[in-house]
Image (spheres, helix red, strand yellow):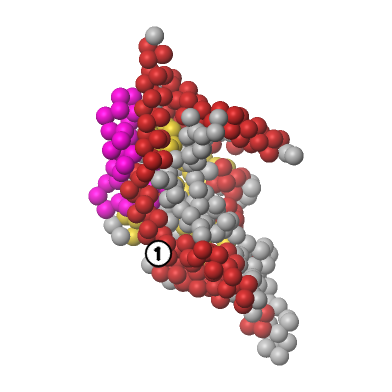
Amino acid sequence: MTRLSEKMKTENDQASARLKGRTMIHMFQPSVGAEELEAIGEVFDSNWLGYGPRTQAFEKEFADHLGVPPESVLFINSATSGLHLTMELLDVGPGDDVLLPSVSFVANANSVAARGARPVFFDVDPHTLNPSVADIEAALTPRTKAVTVLHYGGQPGDIIAITALCEERGIPLIEDAACSVGSSVDGKACGSFGDIGIWSFDSRKIITTGDGGMIYVRDPELARRAHRLAYHGLEDRGAFATAAKDPRRWWDLTVHDLGRRLIGNDVTAAIGRVQLRRLPDFISRRGAIAAEYNRLLSGCEGVLLPPEPPDGHVSTNYFYWVRLDAEIRDAVAEDLLAQGVYTTFRYPPLHEVPLYGADVVLPGTDEAAATILLLPLHQALSEEDVRRVARELRVAVERRTHRRAA
């Protein structure tokens, strides 16, 4: 067993011991069932499990969901693969800087560093956890090759202004839309504003394929290259015959790039197609849960609720976060865990990770990391679950506030 596995097992055992028979309310939980199983069964019956018609259909349906051309979208095996592919498409390398929020998933910085480039971290607002144009401008360097933004927790940031800034400076814009599969601004899907957008369908996301992701590439030629790189550099993923120089020798190949195998398959795509059809109901349910949290926690002393999206902004409500006094935040999280309510903070600031060697002061990020707590939010939460989370949070905050005052 690896050290990480041992740590996770220890934490799970400790949490189970604290519960004493109570059911744990988790942060994330997939919503899959009979429809997804039936779709998988149809794939098995077809006897074609790899990249095929269902993958192509999923790509088209997702493109329709975004309002972009189908050929600009590619179903891949993970959003992380999409981030690494993005760095290759943009020819990021040694001597380049790629800007990104410090409050983002580690895969963002890893994909930059893996190319020999430097991740340059910018600040975020401690309440919205999204950056302003000024935050990004302050981090720009003469070596800036690209800018990555994250719509935190599915809440769209100031993407219109950020897009305008990048276009003005001639800098490619990457949207990490992993948590924003249904988010939009003025009717335009998040992930489609910039040059490249990436979504995640891992087991904790709003729609899931177990593992998997989608990448959107605006430039048609770059999109064609993305398709080649994602399947060994071959001109055509679907049939070797169309890739051959001579149609009579369908086993011959035409290879343009040193690619890898990043593509999805019909098994996971079949799940994704069902999940995409269910997405409106998922988002509606998450919105109702967030609204109920707002109602139940309104007026709770010491608890600052998340900001309401501006007019024209639609959120997936992937995260629901509250701000607490930094001196009690961790203790409140421990109290909630003891009562069977799992909470967390995502994402730990990347500028503090020694690997990246960042020497930067980001006060908004530091404040958020010390005060923000994410509450459970997923489609499977019952009304009683939501009431229990809110009740336990109120109790824990009051208890810890009184102890501190004493």
Query: In the visual, does 308 lie left or right of 247?
Result: left
- Can you name the residue that lies furthest to the front here? 21
- Residue 148 at x, y = what percent? 47, 48
Please, is residue 187 above or below residue 378 in the view? below
Note whether residue 308 is visible: yes
In which quadrant is the C terminus drawn?
top left
Find the magenta span and give its range. 291-320
Where is residue 2, by image quadrant? top right
Q: Secondary structure at mark 1?
A: helix
- Can you name the residue that lies furthest to the top here? 406
- Residue 9 at x, y = what percent? 66, 36
Is 315 inside the magenta-drawn segment? yes
Q: Main secondary structure of the magenta part?
A: loop
- Residue 81 at x, y = what percent? 59, 56
- Residue 298 at x, y = what percent? 28, 33
Name the residue carrying label 1.
66
